[in-house]
Image (spheres, rainbow, N blue to C red):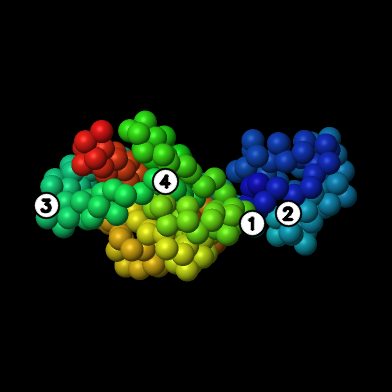
Amino acid sequence: MLFLDYIPDLNPLEYEIYHYIANNLKTVTYMRIRDLANETHTSTASILRFCHKFECNGFSEFKVKLQLYYESINQAQIADVDETQHIHFLERVNEPFLENKIQQAVDLLSDKGLVLFLGSGSSEPIAAYGSLYFTNLSQTALRIEDPSNYPIEWFPDDILARTCVIALSVTGETKELIHYIQRLNTKKCPIISITNSDSSTISRMSDLNIPYTINRETIYKTSNNHDKTIELTSQLPALFLIEKIAKRLRLQRNI
Protein backbone atom coordinates (compact mmCIF):
# COMPACT_ATOMS: atom_id res chain seq x y z
CA MET A 1 0.00 0.00 0.00
CA LEU A 2 1.64 3.23 -1.21
CA PHE A 3 5.35 2.78 -0.40
CA LEU A 4 4.81 -0.13 2.00
CA ASP A 5 5.06 -3.80 0.96
CA TYR A 6 2.08 -4.71 3.11
CA ILE A 7 -1.35 -3.34 4.02
CA PRO A 8 -1.36 -1.71 7.46
CA ASP A 9 -4.31 -2.05 9.80
CA LEU A 10 -6.38 1.04 9.02
CA ASN A 11 -9.68 2.08 10.52
CA PRO A 12 -12.47 3.54 8.32
CA LEU A 13 -11.34 7.13 8.91
CA GLU A 14 -7.76 6.28 7.98
CA TYR A 15 -8.96 4.60 4.81
CA GLU A 16 -10.61 7.91 3.88
CA ILE A 17 -7.23 9.61 4.36
CA TYR A 18 -5.53 6.91 2.31
CA HIS A 19 -7.98 7.24 -0.60
CA TYR A 20 -7.50 11.02 -0.70
CA ILE A 21 -3.72 10.65 -0.73
CA ALA A 22 -3.78 7.89 -3.37
CA ASN A 23 -5.88 10.10 -5.65
CA ASN A 24 -3.77 13.22 -5.06
CA LEU A 25 -0.20 11.93 -4.72
CA LYS A 26 1.60 14.93 -6.21
CA THR A 27 -0.55 17.50 -4.42
CA VAL A 28 -0.15 15.92 -0.98
CA THR A 29 3.66 16.08 -1.20
CA TYR A 30 3.38 19.90 -1.10
CA MET A 31 0.63 20.18 1.50
CA ARG A 32 0.91 21.13 5.16
CA ILE A 33 -0.49 18.70 7.70
CA ARG A 34 -3.33 21.09 8.53
CA ASP A 35 -4.24 21.40 4.84
CA LEU A 36 -4.50 17.61 4.52
CA ALA A 37 -6.58 17.42 7.68
CA ASN A 38 -8.98 20.02 6.25
CA GLU A 39 -9.26 18.26 2.89
CA THR A 40 -9.98 14.91 4.53
CA HIS A 41 -12.26 16.40 7.23
CA THR A 42 -10.06 14.94 9.95
CA SER A 43 -7.63 16.34 12.52
CA THR A 44 -3.86 16.73 12.55
CA ALA A 45 -3.75 14.06 15.27
CA SER A 46 -5.51 11.63 12.92
CA ILE A 47 -3.00 12.44 10.17
CA LEU A 48 -0.09 11.77 12.54
CA ARG A 49 -1.56 8.42 13.60
CA PHE A 50 -1.97 7.58 9.92
CA CYS A 51 1.71 8.45 9.29
CA HIS A 52 2.84 6.24 12.17
CA LYS A 53 1.02 3.29 10.62
CA PHE A 54 3.08 3.91 7.48
CA GLU A 55 6.30 3.64 9.51
CA CYS A 56 6.91 7.39 9.60
CA ASN A 57 7.74 9.46 12.66
CA GLY A 58 5.81 12.44 11.38
CA PHE A 59 4.14 14.08 8.41
CA SER A 60 7.42 15.45 7.03
CA GLU A 61 8.96 11.99 6.80
CA PHE A 62 5.74 10.67 5.28
CA LYS A 63 5.88 13.33 2.55
CA VAL A 64 9.50 12.46 1.72
CA LYS A 65 8.64 8.77 1.30
CA LEU A 66 5.50 9.68 -0.65
CA GLN A 67 7.56 11.88 -2.99
CA LEU A 68 10.00 9.01 -3.65
CA TYR A 69 7.07 6.69 -4.28
CA TYR A 70 5.50 9.20 -6.69
CA GLU A 71 8.80 9.53 -8.57
CA SER A 72 9.19 5.76 -8.81
CA ILE A 73 5.79 5.47 -10.48
CA ASN A 74 6.57 8.16 -13.02
CA GLN A 75 10.15 7.12 -13.66
CA ALA A 76 9.35 3.45 -14.31
CA GLN A 77 10.30 3.08 -17.96
CA ILE A 78 9.08 0.16 -20.01
CA ALA A 79 9.77 -0.57 -23.65
CA ASP A 80 7.30 -1.68 -26.27
CA VAL A 81 7.20 -5.39 -27.03
CA ASP A 82 10.34 -6.40 -28.90
CA GLU A 83 9.17 -8.86 -31.55
CA THR A 84 12.72 -9.40 -32.80
CA GLN A 85 13.83 -11.23 -29.66
CA HIS A 86 10.83 -13.56 -29.97
CA ILE A 87 11.64 -14.21 -33.62
CA HIS A 88 15.27 -14.86 -32.71
CA PHE A 89 14.20 -17.31 -29.99
CA LEU A 90 11.93 -19.20 -32.40
CA GLU A 91 14.81 -19.44 -34.86
CA ARG A 92 17.10 -20.84 -32.15
CA VAL A 93 14.59 -23.54 -31.20
CA ASN A 94 15.53 -25.55 -34.28
CA GLU A 95 19.25 -25.18 -33.73
CA PRO A 96 21.11 -28.14 -32.16
CA PHE A 97 21.46 -26.68 -28.65
CA LEU A 98 17.75 -26.13 -27.89
CA GLU A 99 16.62 -29.01 -30.10
CA ASN A 100 18.76 -31.41 -28.05
CA LYS A 101 17.50 -29.91 -24.80
CA ILE A 102 13.88 -30.40 -25.86
CA GLN A 103 14.52 -34.00 -26.88
CA GLN A 104 16.27 -34.70 -23.58
CA ALA A 105 13.22 -33.35 -21.75
CA VAL A 106 10.95 -35.64 -23.77
CA ASP A 107 13.17 -38.62 -22.99
CA LEU A 108 13.05 -37.83 -19.25
CA LEU A 109 9.27 -37.62 -19.40
CA SER A 110 8.67 -40.64 -21.63
CA ASP A 111 8.27 -43.22 -18.86
CA LYS A 112 6.70 -40.95 -16.24
CA GLY A 113 3.07 -41.24 -15.20
CA LEU A 114 2.83 -37.82 -13.55
CA VAL A 115 4.23 -34.37 -14.27
CA LEU A 116 4.32 -31.75 -11.50
CA PHE A 117 4.62 -28.09 -12.47
CA LEU A 118 6.21 -25.54 -10.14
CA GLY A 119 6.02 -21.79 -10.62
CA SER A 120 5.83 -18.64 -8.53
CA GLY A 121 5.09 -14.99 -9.28
CA SER A 122 4.68 -14.37 -13.00
CA SER A 123 5.59 -18.03 -13.64
CA GLU A 124 2.68 -19.32 -11.53
CA PRO A 125 -0.01 -18.93 -14.24
CA ILE A 126 2.43 -20.46 -16.75
CA ALA A 127 2.71 -23.51 -14.49
CA ALA A 128 -1.09 -23.73 -14.38
CA TYR A 129 -1.24 -23.52 -18.17
CA GLY A 130 1.45 -26.19 -18.47
CA SER A 131 -0.43 -28.66 -16.31
CA LEU A 132 -3.61 -28.09 -18.32
CA TYR A 133 -1.83 -28.37 -21.67
CA PHE A 134 -0.06 -31.61 -20.75
CA THR A 135 -3.32 -33.07 -19.41
CA ASN A 136 -5.10 -32.16 -22.65
CA LEU A 137 -2.47 -34.21 -24.48
CA SER A 138 -3.13 -37.32 -22.36
CA GLN A 139 -0.30 -36.81 -19.85
CA THR A 140 -1.44 -36.58 -16.23
CA ALA A 141 -0.12 -33.30 -14.86
CA LEU A 142 -0.70 -31.18 -11.77
CA ARG A 143 0.46 -27.81 -10.50
CA ILE A 144 1.79 -27.35 -6.98
CA GLU A 145 -0.13 -24.20 -6.12
CA ASP A 146 1.82 -23.29 -2.98
CA PRO A 147 5.23 -25.02 -2.78
CA SER A 148 5.98 -23.49 0.62
CA ASN A 149 2.94 -25.23 2.13
CA TYR A 150 2.97 -28.48 0.19
CA PRO A 151 5.70 -30.71 1.68
CA ILE A 152 7.34 -33.12 -0.72
CA GLU A 153 7.02 -35.75 2.03
CA TRP A 154 3.33 -35.97 1.16
CA PHE A 155 4.29 -37.87 -1.98
CA PRO A 156 5.18 -41.56 -1.44
CA ASP A 157 8.57 -42.54 -2.85
CA ASP A 158 7.04 -44.97 -5.33
CA ILE A 159 4.93 -42.17 -6.82
CA LEU A 160 7.88 -39.77 -6.99
CA ALA A 161 9.87 -42.43 -8.84
CA ARG A 162 7.24 -42.22 -11.60
CA THR A 163 7.06 -38.42 -11.49
CA CYS A 164 8.95 -35.65 -13.28
CA VAL A 165 8.95 -32.03 -12.09
CA ILE A 166 9.00 -29.05 -14.44
CA ALA A 167 10.10 -25.91 -12.59
CA LEU A 168 9.45 -22.52 -14.19
CA SER A 169 11.34 -19.39 -13.16
CA VAL A 170 12.53 -16.38 -15.14
CA THR A 171 15.46 -15.59 -12.85
CA GLY A 172 16.05 -19.11 -11.60
CA GLU A 173 16.49 -17.62 -8.13
CA THR A 174 12.96 -17.93 -6.70
CA LYS A 175 13.57 -18.79 -3.04
CA GLU A 176 10.49 -20.93 -2.41
CA LEU A 177 11.20 -23.00 -5.54
CA ILE A 178 14.85 -23.43 -4.55
CA HIS A 179 13.78 -24.68 -1.12
CA TYR A 180 11.28 -27.11 -2.67
CA ILE A 181 13.79 -28.41 -5.23
CA GLN A 182 16.36 -28.96 -2.48
CA ARG A 183 13.91 -31.40 -0.91
CA LEU A 184 13.24 -33.00 -4.30
CA ASN A 185 16.95 -33.54 -4.87
CA THR A 186 16.88 -36.13 -2.08
CA LYS A 187 14.26 -38.14 -3.98
CA LYS A 188 14.41 -40.18 -7.16
CA CYS A 189 12.47 -37.58 -9.09
CA PRO A 190 14.05 -35.87 -12.14
CA ILE A 191 13.71 -32.10 -12.40
CA ILE A 192 13.45 -30.13 -15.63
CA SER A 193 13.80 -26.39 -15.27
CA ILE A 194 12.83 -23.76 -17.82
CA THR A 195 14.59 -20.49 -17.02
CA ASN A 196 15.98 -17.45 -18.76
CA SER A 197 19.56 -18.27 -17.75
CA ASP A 198 21.53 -21.50 -17.52
CA SER A 199 23.74 -20.14 -14.72
CA SER A 200 21.03 -19.67 -12.08
CA THR A 201 20.63 -21.64 -8.86
CA ILE A 202 17.56 -23.53 -10.08
CA SER A 203 19.21 -24.44 -13.39
CA ARG A 204 22.21 -25.90 -11.56
CA MET A 205 19.96 -27.88 -9.20
CA SER A 206 18.03 -29.45 -12.08
CA ASP A 207 18.70 -32.67 -13.93
CA LEU A 208 18.03 -30.75 -17.13
CA ASN A 209 17.81 -27.01 -17.74
CA ILE A 210 16.34 -25.40 -20.84
CA PRO A 211 17.39 -21.72 -21.01
CA TYR A 212 15.56 -19.50 -23.46
CA THR A 213 17.85 -16.47 -23.01
CA ILE A 214 15.95 -13.32 -23.91
CA ASN A 215 16.31 -9.76 -22.62
CA ARG A 216 15.10 -9.51 -19.04
CA GLU A 217 12.79 -6.60 -18.28
CA THR A 218 11.99 -5.33 -14.78
CA ILE A 219 10.98 -2.11 -13.06
CA TYR A 220 11.66 -1.08 -9.49
CA LYS A 221 8.79 -1.21 -7.04
CA THR A 222 10.07 1.97 -5.37
CA SER A 223 12.79 4.43 -6.31
CA ASN A 224 14.58 4.11 -2.96
CA ASN A 225 14.68 0.30 -2.85
CA HIS A 226 16.28 -1.34 -5.86
CA ASP A 227 16.24 -4.80 -4.28
CA LYS A 228 12.54 -5.25 -5.05
CA THR A 229 11.46 -5.38 -8.65
CA ILE A 230 8.39 -6.17 -10.74
CA GLU A 231 9.09 -8.86 -13.34
CA LEU A 232 8.01 -7.91 -16.87
CA THR A 233 10.11 -10.39 -18.86
CA SER A 234 8.10 -12.09 -21.58
CA GLN A 235 6.80 -15.58 -20.80
CA LEU A 236 6.25 -16.41 -24.47
CA PRO A 237 9.40 -18.62 -24.69
CA ALA A 238 8.35 -20.62 -21.62
CA LEU A 239 4.89 -21.16 -23.09
CA PHE A 240 6.34 -22.24 -26.42
CA LEU A 241 8.74 -24.72 -24.81
CA ILE A 242 5.95 -26.25 -22.74
CA GLU A 243 3.80 -26.76 -25.83
CA LYS A 244 6.75 -28.06 -27.86
CA ILE A 245 7.72 -30.62 -25.22
CA ALA A 246 4.11 -31.74 -24.63
CA LYS A 247 3.42 -32.32 -28.33
CA ARG A 248 6.77 -34.00 -28.93
CA LEU A 249 6.08 -36.32 -25.98
CA ARG A 250 2.68 -37.35 -27.37
CA LEU A 251 4.16 -37.97 -30.82
CA GLN A 252 6.95 -40.07 -29.37
CA ARG A 253 4.45 -42.20 -27.49
CA ASN A 254 2.34 -42.64 -30.65
CA ILE A 255 -0.83 -41.86 -28.73
Could you say whether the residue bearing mark 1 is in a helix, strand or loop? Answer: helix
Question: What whole-number distance in Å separates the C-alpha atoms at marks 4 and 3?
Answer: 29 Å
Name the residue rendered at 39%, 45% in the picture. 113
Question: What whole-number distance in Å separates the C-alpha atoms at marks 4 and 2?
Answer: 47 Å
Q: Earlier in the sequence, mark 4 or mark 1?
A: 1
Q: Which residue matches tag 3? A: 95
Quick check: marks 4 and 2 in contact, CB under 8 Å? no
Q: In the drawing, what numbered circle is on residue 114?
A: 4
Q: Which residue matches tag 2? A: 54
Which residue is outermost to the left? 95
Q: In the drawing, what numbered circle is on residue 65?
A: 1
Question: Disc 4 or disc 2, which is closer to the eye?
Answer: 4
Mark 4: few/some/many CA within 10 Å (<14, 14-19, 20+): many
The residue lying toward the viewer, choosing from 149 and 230, is: 149
Could you say whether the residue bearing mark 4 is in a helix, strand or loop? Answer: strand
Quick check: marks 3 and 1 in contact, CB under 8 Å? no
The residue lying toward the viewer, choosing from 253 and 93, is: 253
Question: Disc 2 marks which amino acid?
Answer: Phe
Question: What whole-number distance in Å separates the C-alpha atoms at marks 2 and 3?
Answer: 53 Å
